Structures are given as structure tokens and as C-alpha cells.
Amino acid sequence: MALLTYLVLAHLFLSLAATGAEKVPAVIVFGDSSVDAGNNNVISTILKSNFAPYGRDFYGGQATGRFSNGRVPSDFISEAFGLRPFVPAYLDPMYNISDFAVGVNFASAGTGFDNATSDVLSVIPLWKEVEYYKDYQTKLRAYLGDKKANTIITESLYLTSLGTNDFLENYYTMRDRRSHYTIDQFQDFILGLAENFVKEIYGLGARKISLGGLPPMGCLPLERTTNFLGGNGDTCTETYNNVALGFNVKMTGLVAKLNEELPGAKVVFSNPYFIFLQILQRPAFYGFDVSSVACCATGMFEMGYMCNRYTAFTCTDASKYVFWDAFHPTEKTNRIISDHVVKHVLSGFF
């Protein structure tokens, strides 16, 4: 009954929120695999998801390149603002500037704030995402004219979801980074890059900006498996969770600083940590049966090409699982987290 009440209220809130959609004419997305809508499909990298069973619960059962069985958070947030129920990838040849005028996604799975992070799996670095955004602005002005295009640029909601890869795929994997930075120093380094990024897109016209925080990354199935193989049992890696918590505290301070320094800007912190942790700690309350392993294959380590249509054991109903693959949530989890962020953080933009 509690879950039913939550879902009904969430649906009601999103329906009411859509009435304020004119305040946000488009959603513009920067980020990593948490929001990638298919940009990695067209680059030379092993980090792809444009094949079954990815996307099996997306519209038409299409594997778009989203690292999920269905939609990702930016899709749900776009829908909440009364816009299209998904935000297309900028490099997807199926879409053009008329589509991107109401929402565009520059995210690339595997990237981070640090350029060294994108080098690990040869994906699109954040600076290149910004270059694509500049190209988008040029096309938008040619399509709509300067006045209307400038309105879209300044009134759009900018979503940023980055950081997890900087720690898990970079700092804790590459010896070079650990030899140059303590974890506290590396957090500050990443925060400095985040600050520079926000100031850059602000200089290009962005005013409504959401910075995403880190999830409880020590509880991802891949990290739990690593913890288990290391003899620590099937539990979350609390060291990683504590790093995420500390980083998020610092990100809160950065957001306050940016709002003081950037006239006319409204920067918010969309922190997924606590709602995600609550789902993991009370899965049954949210309608989940399994929270420690993923739906795809064994659910312990598979993602990308290791999660494919020929992989045995993949679950039949992803809605019972918190995680889709060993690194990414299911569509249902994405929806719950997105609804929470819209209600508690992004509602100020309606």
C-alpha cells in the first residue's frame, strides 16, 4: 500500500509539473553512461550497449545505446517537464536539429570530468561534449534564428551526470593518479574541473544547471563482486561509499559558490546518493526482489558486450531488480530516482 501511494503521488506530481513546461523549452544533457543515449554507438570504443538485451523495455524494444533495459534519468526528467519522453543522442543519425531543439544529449559512457578518464576506454571526453554543444548552438541559430535560439539556450535545463568513472575507472584503477593525489586531493581536483565546466557552459549561455552527485558506488554489483573476491563477503565497499559522501558534501559547497559568482545562474545539486541507498537498503518497499546482483547474466560483473542476447541466466523481469547490469540501474530504478530529484530539487525550475 505504501508503494502504491508513493507511485500515485509521484505520477500526480509529474502531471502537475508538466503544466509549467513552458519555463524549460529543452533539456540539454552532459554526462557518462548514467545518461548516455547512444553517442558511443558511433565512436570506436568497446563500451557500447546498442544490442539486445539492452533496451528490451525501451520504446519498440530498441537497443539505443542506453545502458539500461529502458530509459535513463534524463529521459524521465524531460518527460516531467512536459517535453518528449526521451532525449536523443546528438550523434544519432536518426535525429536532426528539429529534434534537438527540444532536447539533446551529448553524454558518452565511460567519460568523466578528467580527460584521463575518457582515455581509459577511448570515449568522448567532456571537452568534446562541450564542442558538440557549440556546434549544436550554431545549428540551432541557423534553424530558428538568433532570438528564438538564444531563448532556448538560456531557458533550457542543463543536466550533468558525471564523476563515478573518475573514481572507479580512473583513480582506483590507474596507479599514476594515486601516485599524484591523495583521495582528498583528487576529489578537489575533480571539483575544480566541474567548476571550470559549469563556468564554460555558463559563458555559452547556460543558466539553469543541475550538477549530479555520486551514488553509493561501493554498492554497485561489480564492486560488491570485487569485495567478495577480496575475501570481504558480499557487502558494499564502504570505502567507496564514504568517498562518494565526502565528494557530495564538497559538491554542495561548489554549488553555493557558483551561485554567488555567476550572475543570473541557478545551479542546483541533484544528489542521488540517499534515495539510491534507501532503495538498496529497503528494496521490497520500492517493489524490488533483488538488490545485490543485476538482471543481466550472473549479475555479478557483466556489462557492455558481456551482457548480450547470448548470455545465459538473464532475468525475465527487470522490474524486480535494482540493477540492470553490474554497473547500471534498471529503468524502474532510474524512474524512482528521477522522480525524487524532480520533486525535491528540480521543481524550482517549473
Image: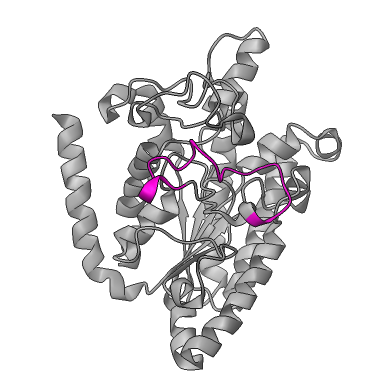
At 70% from the left and 64% from the top, the residue drawn is 128
Residue 72, image x, y percentages: 44, 48
Residue 175, image x, y percentages: 84, 33
| Vertical placement of residue 106 versus 308, above or below | below
Left or right, 15 with reference to 132: left
- In terms of secondary structure, what is the magenta stretch mainly? loop
Residue placed most toward the observer, 338 or 329: 329
State which quarter of the image contains the C terminus.
bottom left
Left or right, 340 with reference to 167: left
Residue 101, image x, y percentages: 45, 76
Q: Which residues are magenta?
A: 42-62
Membership of 49 in magenta stretch: yes
Seen as rendered, the residue at the extreme front is 310
Colouring chosen for the image of the structure? one colour
Q: Residue 198, can we see it?
A: yes
State which quarter of the image contains the N terminus.
top left
| Vertical placement of residue 338 versus 197, above or below | above
Residue placed most toward the observer, 223 or 57: 57
Residue 286, image x, y percentages: 28, 30
Dividing the picture into quadrants, the one containing residue 168 is top right
Circle count: 0
| Vertical placement of residue 288 versus 176, above or below | above
Q: Residue 345, can we see it?
A: no
Membership of 96 in magenta stretch: no
| Vertical placement of residue 293 versus 29, above or below | above
